[in-house]
């Protein structure tokens, strides 16, 4: 059973229980290449190199690009999140405890999905990294990262994503080029968006609370193209509630089988930002 269930007894608690400060599911899964219903423990993503166009003589053979075809293997792992609910405890609370724990487990697995993707983003080499420079998120860093993506011929096709920490999101809102209608127009103002997502510089900018931060308070943010990473799912989040008479309890189990893999390192830029206390 939930060890803290006594805190939810009816005396001083309202009917609805809110999951405090939890992200409701994955925010990043739709920002990367996704393969669903994978059979087995591995998924393979194809990686194709750049082609070169050439001329040919009259009646000559059409030149062959000889594209470099390689594959990247993504290993899936199984994840679980469950909890016990005592039947008599359910009678003492005025909430649907089974649904609360089912939701909490699903949200936990959603965060795990994002964690898998973020860990792969963080595996890029130093050549794709912008140092913190003892500063937070600045327009200079954004322009430097944009230059790296451009020099690598990363497509500017509306499938670029930038995920930043909440402190960096606040710093972006202080940059006129990001937040002022004088630059982005009234339809793209971040303050008017229904969610904390903004399209800027051909990129969807997304704040996220799960980005890595080191012991020196340096936060890693990432700018990437959708094709640079892959996410594979053998089983999406499934919830199962079963009754165990010997325990007089329900067991709520949430489970999934998923994995993530970096496919093209040059399609990712890591932007390090200092968020030490002033």
Image (cartoon, grey):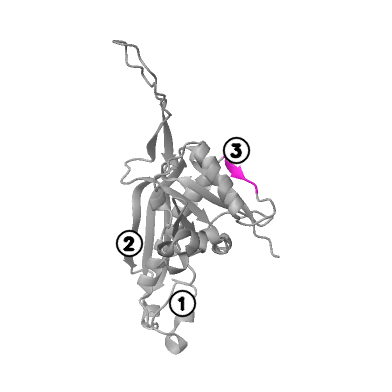
Residue drawn at the location 38% of the way across and 61% of the way down = 253
Identify the magenta region: 125-131
Residue drawn at the location 34% of the way across and 50% of the way down = 235
Image-quadrant location for residue 199: bottom left
Q: Residue 5 carries which label?
A: 1
Q: Which mark is residue 127?
A: 3
Q: Which mark is residue 101?
A: none
Q: Mark 2 points at which residue?
A: 240
Crowdedness of circle 2 by 10 Å Cα count: few (<14), some, many (20+)? few
Q: Going from the N terminus, do you reach mark 3 or mark 2 first?
A: 3
Tell me residue 213's x, y (percent): 61, 55
Tell me residue 260's x, y (percent): 44, 45
The residue tagged with tag 1: helix, strand or loop? Answer: helix
The residue tagged with tag 3: helix, strand or loop? Answer: helix
Residue drawn at the location 49% of the way across and 62% of the way down = 182
Tell me residue 4's x, y (percent): 49, 75
């Amino acid at each position: 059973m939930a060890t803290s269930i006594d805190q939810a007894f009816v005396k001083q608690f309202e009917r609805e229980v809110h999951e405090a400060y939890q992200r409701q599911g994955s925010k990043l899964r739709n920002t990367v290449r996704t393969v669903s219903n994978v059979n087995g423990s591995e998924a393979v993503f194809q990686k194709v190199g750049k082609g070169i166009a050439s001329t040919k003589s009259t009646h000559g053979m059409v030149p062959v690009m000889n594209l470099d075809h390689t594959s990247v293997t993504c290993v899936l792992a199984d994840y679980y999140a469950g909890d016990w609910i005592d039947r008599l405890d359910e009678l003492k609370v005025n909430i649907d405890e089974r649904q609360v724990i089912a939701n909490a487990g699903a949200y936990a697995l959603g965060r795990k999905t994002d964690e898998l993707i973020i860990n792969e983003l963080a595996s890029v080499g130093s050549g794709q990294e912008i140092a913190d420079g003892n500063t937070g998120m600045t327009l200079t860093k954004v322009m430097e990262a944009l230059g790296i993506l451009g020099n690598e011929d990363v497509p500017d096709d509306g499938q670029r994503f930038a995920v930043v920490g909440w402190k960096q999101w606040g710093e972006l809102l202080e940059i006129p080029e990001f937040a002022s209608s004088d630059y982005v127009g009234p339809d793209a103002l971040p303050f008017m968006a229904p969610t904390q997502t903004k399209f800027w510089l051909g990129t969807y900018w997304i704040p996220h609370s799960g980005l890595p931060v080191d012991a020196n308070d340096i936060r890693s943010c990432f700018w990437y193209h959708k094709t640079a990473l892959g996410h594979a799912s053998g089983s999406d989040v499934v919830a199962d509630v079963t009754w165990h008479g010997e325990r007089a309890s329900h067991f709520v189990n949430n489970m999934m089988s998923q994995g993530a893999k970096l496919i093209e390192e040059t399609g990712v830029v890591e932007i390090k930002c200092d968020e030490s206390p002033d």
